[in-house]
Image (cartoon, rainbow, N blue to C red):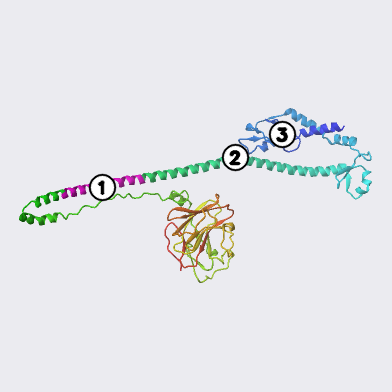
Amino acid sequence: MAAVAAAVAGFQAEAKCPICLDYLRDPVTIECGHNFCHSCVQQSWVDLQDSFPCPVCRCRCEEGHFRSNTQLGRMVEIARLLHSPRSNKKGQEETSRCEKHSQVLSVFCGEDLEMLCPLCTQAPEYRSHHVRPIEEAASHHRKRLRGYMESLKKQLVDLQKLISIQSKKPLELREKVENQRQELSSEFEHLNQFLDREEYAMLSRLDEEEKDIEQKLSANIRAFSNHLSTLKSQLSKAVELSVLSEVEMLSQIKVFYRSENEASPSIFSIHLRREGCSFPPQYSALQRIIRRFKVDVMLDPETAHPNLMVSEDKKCVRFTKRKQKVHALPRRFTVRPVVLGFPYFLSGRHFWEVEVGDKSKWAIGVCKDSLPTKARRPPSPWQGCWTVQLQDNGHAAPGAAPAPLLLDVKDRVIGVFLYYELGEISFYDMAEKSHTYTFSDTFSGPLRPYFQVGPDSKPLRVCTGADCEWKLP
C-alpha cells in the first residue's frame, strides 16, 4: 500500500504547474518539453520580446511558441479525483496507525507537529500539549499553507517580472554603448576637423610668409648688385684720377670723395615666425574642450573662515587681519583660512580656472563636502581633499603624480579639471597650457571646489569668461 500511495503522490506532483504549484489548468507544452498552465506561462512572458526562456530550465524558446496538451489535461482531472477527501481519509484509516500502540492516528499535536493515537496523548510528555482531531488540524494547516502558497505565488510573479526587466538590460546596454560610441566618434570628428582647419591655416600663413621673405630677399640682392656696380664705377674713376696731372687730379678729387661715401645696404636676415598650437588641458588640444567642460564656480560665504572676505559677486576672496562678524554655522571653517565653492559635483567632467596672482601662499583643488571644518592639520587625499599648494615659492601636491618638486614657479592662473567617474583631478599651468599634476582616487558622495587663502592682502579670484573687476570693500 505504501508503494501505491507513493506512486499516486508522484503522479499528482507531475500534474501540477511549476509556476503556481496548483493542478494544471488548460495545460500547454513549450519547446523544451516542460508543461505549464496556459495563463501562467503567458504571464511569465508578458514583457518579453526577443527571448522567451523556460521558467524551469531557462532554455530559450523562439517567439514564445507553445501547444495545448489535451491528453495531459485529462490526466490532471484523474489526479484531482485521486486527491478527493474520501479516498484520502480511507487510505489514512487503513495505513495511518500508531507504531507503538497499533491504534489509528486520530489526533494531532500542535507543539510537536506529530499525529498521535488516543493512547499517546495519555503519556506525561503530551498531557500539557495542545492536541486536536486530525480533520480540525488539517483544516487549520491547509489554511496556513494556502497563505504560504499565495505569498510564494506573489514572489514568483515578482521574480518573473524582475527576470523580464533584467532580460531587457543587454539591449539597454547595447543602446547606451552605441550612443556613447556615436558621441565619441562625433567628438573626434570635430577634433579632426579642427586640426585640419588649423593645419591649413598655419600652412597658408607659412606660404605667405615664404613669399614675403623671398620678395625682401630679392630686393636685398638687387640692392647689393647696385652697390657692386657703384663700387666698380668708383674703382674705374679712381684709376683714371690717379694717372692725371697734379692740377687735373686735384680739381676733380672733391667730387670723387663725395661719391665714395655711399653706404652699403644692410644684410637681410631670414627669420620665420614660429607657428604653434596652444592646446587646452583635457586632450592637450583644442580650446573647444575647455569651453565644453568649463563650469561657473562661485565661492560659498557660509563656509568662509572669519578672516576671509568674499566679494559681492562671490568670485574673489582675500585674507583680512580683522575677523569678520559672521554667523557660527556648522559648515564654516574656523581653524584654517578655507572657503569652499559651488556647485556640488556628483558626476561628470568639470573645468575651472583660478587666478592666484602674486600670492605667496595658497592651496586650491577639490574636497569632499564632509571635510572636517575644525581640523588643525592640513587636509590630505586620505581625508578627502586633493590640492596643489604654493608655499616657500614652490609647488607641493602630496599624493599626486608625477611626484611634485619644490621648484620656483611663476604660475598666475591654475586650471583644475575633475573627471568624477574616472577618479581623476588634474591641474594645469594655463600660461603654458601644460599639465602639472594629477590625483587618482575613487570618489563617492558630493565634491566641492576648495580654496585656502594665505595670510596676505592679495586676493584670489575664480576666473570667468571675461576679466572681472575686484569688488572687495
Quadrant in which the N terminus appears: top right
Where residue 84 appears, as percent x and y from the top left, is 83, 35
Residue 205 lies in the magenta stretch: yes
Can residue 424 be seen in the rendering of this structure? yes
Amino acid type, label 2: Pro
- Residue at 79% x, 33% y is 12
Q: Which residue is the site of mark 1?
A: 217
- Residue at 38% x, 44% y is 199
- Residue stretch rendered in magenta on the structure: 202-231
Report the predominant secondary structure element of the magenta stretch: helix
Which of the 4 image quadrants contains residue 59?
A: top right
- Residue at 16% x, 50% y is 231
Q: Secondary structure at mark 2?
A: helix
Residue 255 lies in the magenta stretch: no
Residue 434 left/right relative to 64:
left
First of labels 3, 2 by sequence position: 3
Amino acid type, label 3: Phe
Q: Which residue is the site of mark 3?
A: 36
